[in-house]
Amino acid sequence: MKNKFRAIACGLMIFSSISAQEVTYTEYNLKNGLHVILHQENKAPVVTVGVMYHVGAKDEDPKRTGFAHFFEHLLFEGTKNIERGKWFDIVAANGGRNNANTTQDRTYYYETFPSNKLELALWMESERMLHPVINQIGVDTQNEVVKEEKRQRIDNSPYGKIIYRTGINKHLFKKHPYGQSVIGSMEHLDAATLDEFIAFNKKYYNPNNATLVIAGDIKIEETMNFVSDYFAPIKNISEKPVKPNILEDPITTEINTKEYDANIRIPAKVLVYRTPKQVERDAYVFDYISTVLSGGKSSRLYKKMVTDKKMALEVFAFSDAQEDYGTYIMAALPLGDVGLEKLQTEMDNAINKLQNELISEREFQKLQNKFENKFVNANSSIEGIANSLARYHVLYKDTDLINKEIEIYRSITREDIQRVAKQYLNKNQRLNLDYLPGTGK
């Protein structure tokens, strides 16, 4: 009885902490189409200003891949009123920090400043949108930066083709541009003209294709006036881009192939499945599945393959749901002279068990607790809240998922986990990849 009351008390504590995490916000559109989201939280004198553009690697010309990621770098070069090379100096001199990142679906720029520098952050992002300087010296400079990034992260990085999907997505997506890597082709970037970069900017980096998010120590009405001053006068250079609906043929036969990596000595067995896009409920079920299989040392794959049988040096599985499709990746590195086929057998056994048996109530409760904690932690920082607000609006078309998403996870049942495993994790629906040392020559 004492344990029962303790469990109830813990549940009430979790519920109250989640309720306290509710994120309030104000959102509206400017006449030029810019979507604005404001979140006021005056606990600390800090503010994050971010702009998410709905452009990523999937929006590129197949003969000019890498443009979206290239612009992540290029738009820090300078503007009409910010001298070339001075962007980061201005941010640092005013006690701030900034960064940007690109995916297949969007590009996100943000600054975090002391809240008395809010106007500075707004001015800088409005400058990036209105007055970017795109010239040959900037293109040439960032071309070398991107090449070095590719060398460090992919070409010379162990397992880089798995981590950055360059050795995976090309096999899963033959029609959809998800088959292209985010970092793109260096040959394409080398061949591109300055006019092509200027045209890409005119097409995608407009108010009608952007979401501005401001979170932190602000006053809503005052901030709305600032937004109007800095962003309302910006005109769209082109119409809002239309996203094509490109459908992949279903995978009906197992794709067996090999990729080589001269940076590794230990091979890997990699199994990859195409899964639903991120707005679908089944995409959330895959988050549960990946946690069951490889979420920590007590997970099924880790315990069986690493701890008990000592046949794997490492094992992992994770879901990567995106705007149009998702992928579910399982991989294991052998220990000693264990063959890749033995690793595959164990991974298939784990999948078969999910397909044929409901997970235990205890395991299911542990899952739910993990995702309750994940939800609370996701909104524990101003930068995290800003990113989430922008992402949910741009990619999910529902800003309030920042508060509601936990209900989706709570609605998932043990039967859902079994059903989704049966529907998507079949041998004839996957990429079966041997990731091997060497060059393959």
Image: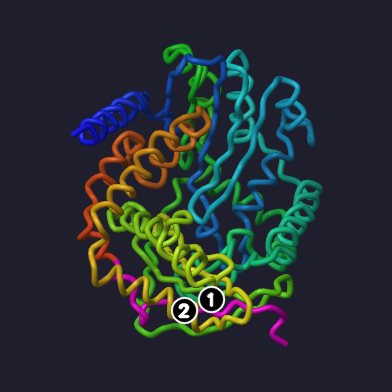
Residue 354: give x, y in percent of width and height.
Answer: 30, 68
Residue 320, which numbered label?
A: none
| Dot 2 crowding, Cα within 10 Å, few <14, some 14–19, many 20+ | some
Q: Position of residue 408 (x, y in %)?
A: 27, 45
Quadrant (top left, top right, bottom left, bottom right) of the C terminus: bottom right
Circle 2: residue type: Gln
Query: Considering depth in this image, is 304 or 121 the residue closer to the camera?
Result: 304
Residue at 60%, 77% in the rendered image: 435
Q: Residues within 10 Å of mark 1 (few under 14, many from 20)?
A: many
Q: Residue 280: which quarter of the image?
A: bottom left
Q: Is residue 429 magenta?
A: yes
Question: Which residue was labeled with disc 1?
Answer: 269
For the point 23% across and 57% down, which residue is it? Answer: 414
* Residues drawn in magenta: 421-441
Q: Amino acid at mark 1?
A: Lys
- Indicate whether 6 appears above or below 327: above
Name the image quarter holding residue 338.
bottom right
Q: Is residue 411 left or right of residue 56?
A: left
Position in image of residue 26 (x %, y %): 36, 24
Q: Circle 2 sits on which residue?
A: 344
